[in-house]
Image (tube, rainbow, N blue to C red):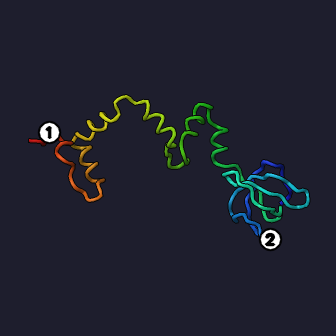
Amino acid sequence: MKPVPEGSRIRVVRNSNHHNYTIGQIYTVNHDDQDGTFDAADAGGKVGDWLRWEDCEPASPSAWDQIAADLPEDLVRFLSCFDGIQSLTLRQPIVDAMLAKLPDLHERIVAAAARPEVGGMISANRPNGDELPTAIHPETAD
């Protein structure tokens, strides 16, 4: 591969000089040493040792970069609150902030758990499958 500008994404395909990069992974060019070697950063920003250009190939743009380029800014900000693209999981700081703003959350959850269809789902999730105490099902209490 020919040298590319710093900030470009590359994929490591060989290990001719015993570098510490993972073959098949994508990195971002950090510094070109102008002698046929460069170093690159992983997704977490950790920079590895020297790598030869011949051990790499250009990496295609990430799916996120393509999505972000095509969507309106407010939707990109919304999606950036999640981890992943295929199976979206809301990031924990976002969940915490949302839950902190919900009034009477505890009472809402307890009320929902009192409904038979929800109580059954909760019981099914218990480690030993035991039914919930009757205190949670007020309609069945004596």
Residue in view at x 83 percent, y 58 percent: 38
| Inter-mark Cα distance, 2 to 1 | 71 Å
Residue 52 lies left or right of residue 75; in this view the side is: right
Q: Secondary structure at mark 1?
A: helix
- Disc 1 marks a residue whose amino acid type is Glu
Of 124 and 20, nearer the camera is 20
Residue in view at x 23 percent, y 39 percent: 115
User: In the picture, which quadrant includes the C terminus?
Assistant: top left
Residue 55 lies left or right of residue 67; in this view the side is: right
User: In the picture, which quadrant includes the N terminus?
Assistant: bottom right
Q: Quadrant of residue 49?
A: bottom right
Identify whether 87 is placed above or below 81. Answer: below
Of 25 and 58, nearer the camera is 25
Residue in view at x 13 percent, y 42 percent: 140
Q: Secondary structure at mark 2?
A: loop
Residue 106 lies left or right of residue 131; in this view the side is: right
Crowdedness near tag 1: few (<14), some (14–19) or many (≥20) residues, C-alpha within 10 Å:
few
Which mark, by number, is residue 139? 1
Task: Residue 7: give x, y in percent of width and height.
Answer: 78, 48
Residue 98 lies left or right of residue 10; in this view the side is: left
- Disc 2 marks a residue whose amino acid type is Ser
**On the image, numbered disc 2 is attached to which residue?**
16
Task: Residue 31: give x, y in percent of width and height.
Answer: 83, 52
Residue in view at x 43 percent, y 30 percent: 101
